[in-house]
Image: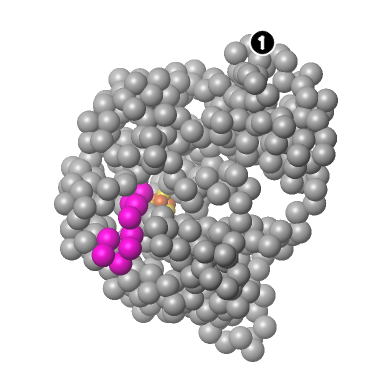
């Protein structure tokens, strides 16, 4: 089959290593004890890709996302080895979006030049805040100056599509300090900005400090979020998703696949997939993951969950994902996909939110306003009648 006739796929590769652990992080990431461990993991990940060579032969990735963790912490040679293995095992289309996540202080021009020549055309950089006291409270490894040096290095390496991750809800953050961060970022001029609400996850260092550090109040957080939506729009970054803003033509094609319910294959320890109608994730245990791939006869089960998605689940998921997007939910498309009327099922429940300014309905499209997006977990819990409000977190994905 020719590449152009194959089905499109988002390919995600997880690198679980970081230079040190941030105070708020509950992602599957660890500080490697030595370089051999990194190399062993990369070799296992390559074996994993190879194992999908036949199963994914009818697919051609049009996006490749190397995320983590901090992929750039493993060094240029390891990253290039991985990229070569992607090309050997998958028919990546010409013009694909290739993203690598990077942290300031783990990149330089030489590395970025080599990555760009290997095909990487998008860099996602974690700044979080332009205020060094806030970065210290998060125990990030970098200061604003390190970020700026890395950002300029990326431009010198002619990477023309850069995302910058920001956060609100950080200890010591105020409206003024947050505005300083926003002004700083738009002055640098990345193509894309992601903005996440800092979540206090049990088990993290920051969670243990929740009573002693000065966190912004919830009202201040709402204010910061709505301020950011306006400020970024005024500077040419349109909100297209609850946490994502882009200049025209620079929406993240890979992440859009998640929100548009398109297929993606996530390989690596703890990676998630939606592939051939199934949702599954790989085990969150590094040793078992590597052993399972190195010794196929070990019969180690690599998947944690493997669920066929029922039509009812698909409907609920579709609604949650569409309401993440500024483009919203089109009732005609909903009827075509599910054979039922969104208005009949949920129209009455949407009314109070429309009247309160949390949602809009125009030309057959329901969408949440920025104010509605901030409380979207409550709105969705209400309309979908989830018993447990904690089941969904629309601001997930914080780096
Ligand atoms: S927040 Fe990001 S950089 Fe920090 S430890 Fe977690 S994965 Fe690593």
- The residue shown at (77%, 22%) is 347
Q: Looking at the picture, does residue 243 appear above or below residue 16? A: above
Q: Is residue 296 left or right of residue 184?
A: right
Give the x, y percent position of residue 86. 44, 71
| Residue 122 shown in magenta | yes
Give the x, y percent position of residue 166. 37, 37
- The residue shown at (22%, 31%) is 187
| The furthest residue to the bottom | 297
| Residue 140 shown in magenta | no
Q: Secondary structure at mark 1?
A: helix
Q: Which residue is mark 1?
A: 355
Q: Quadrant of residue 344?
A: top right
| Residue toward you, 21 or 80 | 80
Q: Over which residues does the magenta segment extend?
A: 116-124
| Residue toward you, 242 or 128 | 242
Q: Is residue 5 left or right of residue 210?
A: right
């Amino acid at each position: 089959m020719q590449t152009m006739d194959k089905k499109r796929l988002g390919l995600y590769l997880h690198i679980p290593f970081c230079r040190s652990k941030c105070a708020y992080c509950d992602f599957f990431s660890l500080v490697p004890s030595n370089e051999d461990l990194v190399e062993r993991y990369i070799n296992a990940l390559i074996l994993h890709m190879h194992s999908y060579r036949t199963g994914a032969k009818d697919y051609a990735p049009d996006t490749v996302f190397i995320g983590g963790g901090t992929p750039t912490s493993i060094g240029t040679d390891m990253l290039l080895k991985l990229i070569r293995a992607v090309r050997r095992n998958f028919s990546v289309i010409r013009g694909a979006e290739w993203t690598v996540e990077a942290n300031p202080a783990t990149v330089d021009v030489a590395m970025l030049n080599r990555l760009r020549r290997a095909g990487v055309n998008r860099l996602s950089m974690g700044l979080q805040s332009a205020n060094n006291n806030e970065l210290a409270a998060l125990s990030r490894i970098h200061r604003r100056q390190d970020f700026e040096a890395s950002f300029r290095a990326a431009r010198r390496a002619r990477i023309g599509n850069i995302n910058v991750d920001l956060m609100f809800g950080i200890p010591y953050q105020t409206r003024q300090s947050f505005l300083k961060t926003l002004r700083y970022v738009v002055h640098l001029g990345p193509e894309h900005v992601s903005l996440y609400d800092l979540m206090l996850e049990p088990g993290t260092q920051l969670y243990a400090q929740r009573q002693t550090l000065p966190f912004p109040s919830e009202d201040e957080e709402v204010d910061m979020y709505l301020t950011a939506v306006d400020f970024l729009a005024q500077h040419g970054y349109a909100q297209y998703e609850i946490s994502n803003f882009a200049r025209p033509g620079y929406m993240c094609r890979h992440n859009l696949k998640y929100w548009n319910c398109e297929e993606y294959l996530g390989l690596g320890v703890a990676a998630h997939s939606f592939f051939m109608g199934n949702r599954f994730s790989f085990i969150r245990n590094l040793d078992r993951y590597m052993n399972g791939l190195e010794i196929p006869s070990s019969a180690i089960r690599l998947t944690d969950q493997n669920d066929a998605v029922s039509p009812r689940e698909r409907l609920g998921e579709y609604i949650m994902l569409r309401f993440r997007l500024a483009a919203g939910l089109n009732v005609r498309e909903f009827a075509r996909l599910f054979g039922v009327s969104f208005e009949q099922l949920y129209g009455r429940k949407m009314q109070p939110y429309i009247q309160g300014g949390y949602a809009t309905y125009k030309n057959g499209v329901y969408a949440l306003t920025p104010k509605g997006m901030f409380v979207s977990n409550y709105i969705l819990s209400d309309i979908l009648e989830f018993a447990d409000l904690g089941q969904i977190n629309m601001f997930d994905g914080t780096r």
